[in-house]
Amino acid sequence: MKKIPLIKPYITEKITAKVCEVLNSGYLTEGQVTKEFEEKVKEYVGCQYALAVCNCTVGLEIGLRAMGIGFGDEVIVPDYTYPATASAVGIVGANIVIVDVDRETMLIDFDALEQAITPRTKAIIPVSIFGNPLDYDRLDKIKEKHNLYILEDAACSIGAKFHGTYVGNLADISVFSLHPRKFITTGEGGMVTTNNRQWADWMLSYKHFGMGVHESRLTTAFDRIGTNYKLSNIQAAIGLSQMDYIEELLARREEISEAYYQLLANTPMISFPKTTNKGKHSWQSCCIFVENRDQIMIKLKEKNIESQIGTYALHMHKAFSENPKCQIVGDMRRSRYAFDHCLTLPLYHEMTEEEQKYVVQELLEAITDYQ
Ligand SMILES: Cc1ncc(COP(=O)(O)O)c(C=O)c1O
């Protein structure tokens, strides 16, 4: 069997043709194609403003800056996430407060979150990890009760929904990643969404060197110190064309994930993370919990199958554990469990039934060695 990759970006001839069209146009930097991509995501998600940026990490940073968060403020993040979630808080000079996650969903634990709130807490960055949407019934109550902003790290969650509303239109600000591990990708890239006009204008200015904004359009006056977090027309051409396939991509990912769950059901040493029953998962990753995860990954690799851990447990890294501006609240037991046991299985649009059966067969084989 040829190598089974973890993910394979879906690139059609139509997509490469669009990229070539941009290259031949001579307009390579952020421009009309980026704008069309923003419009497309905005319409899809149903929000009022969408701003393309060069990656999700800077999207989180400008989201925090737009909210006015900085020195002396506290922002709560889950322990089980990619480090960028927390690093964005450090980058704006605020204090990072890390809490544990739910054992079954791997999403931020709401009780731990509430217990960590102090008068200095300004925002929460919950993460819809792997495309599993967050429970906004609970989150909105916490937000109202404690008067906080919600900046969703929706890196993995384009296409996911909660009670019929798309992720990207649930939080005060949301940020998608367009890294190739995500199924809508621009190589590197991010998209920030919000319904707050003032914040949208501020972010537009800030990502364009601090240029002035009038009627949501840039002017040639420079109103503030800003930076350059733009997304080029070339990159946007990939994302824009991929958006034409989003429903197809989501449906196929769901189909493959459900097949994995069925084929692996009732297998000793394997259990499944809980997915939402109040919305729709986007299946950016299909994960299982498994004993001896690292040895199993090695065995899969020997069989030419690429797999991955889920994500990281922040408390295990000195960027956070030895950081005087970072507070780790609790023992992070459940995050540690996820870090040790979560395994991401290969999942890509063009995966064949034969390839999936091969992955399952080799996974079961690897597991029997430990029974
Ligand atoms: C949850 C989460 N947040 C943030 C990021 C960072 O995204 P980017 O690479 O687009 O900056 C990632 C990347 O994998 C992620 O998984």
Image: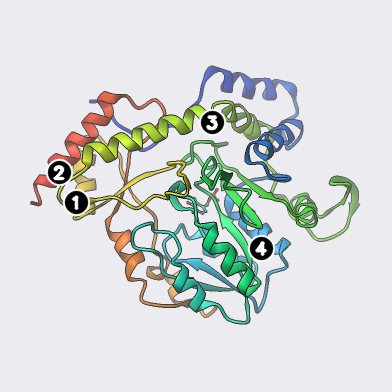
Return the residue nearer the eye: 75 or 322.
75
Instruction: Kindly indicate whether the residue at mark 3 contacts the one at mark 2 (C-beta within 8 angstroms).
Output: no
Circle 1 sits on which residue? 295
**Cα separation between marks 1 and 3:** 35 Å
In front here: 162 or 168? Answer: 162
Secondary-structure class at tag 4: helix
Give the CA separation, mark 2 to mark 3: 34 Å
Task: Please name the amino acid that badge 4 sits on.
Answer: Leu
**Residue 234 rendering spot, x and y as whole percentages:** 65, 31
Up-down relation of residue 46 to residue 251 (above or below): below
193 vs 81: above or below: above
Residue at x-position 14% and y-position 46%: 367
Which numbered mark, 4 or 3, is in the foreground of this view?
3
Q: Quadrant of residue 67?
A: bottom right
Q: CA distance from mark 1 to mark 4?
A: 40 Å
Q: CA distance from mark 4 to mark 2?
A: 44 Å
Q: CA distance from mark 1 to mark 2?
A: 8 Å
* Tag 2 residue: 366
The reply to whether callout 1 and callout 3 are in contact (CB within 8 Å) is no
On residue 64, which mark appears? 4
Tell me which amino acid carries mark 2. Ala
For disc 3, the marked residue is 246
* Residue 20 in which image quadrant: top right
Circle nearer the N terminus (2, 3): 3
The type of residue carrying mark 1 is: Gln
CB-based contact (under 8 Å), mark 1 and mark 2: yes
Q: Position of residue 184 (x, y in %)?
A: 53, 36
Residue 326 visible in the shown view = no
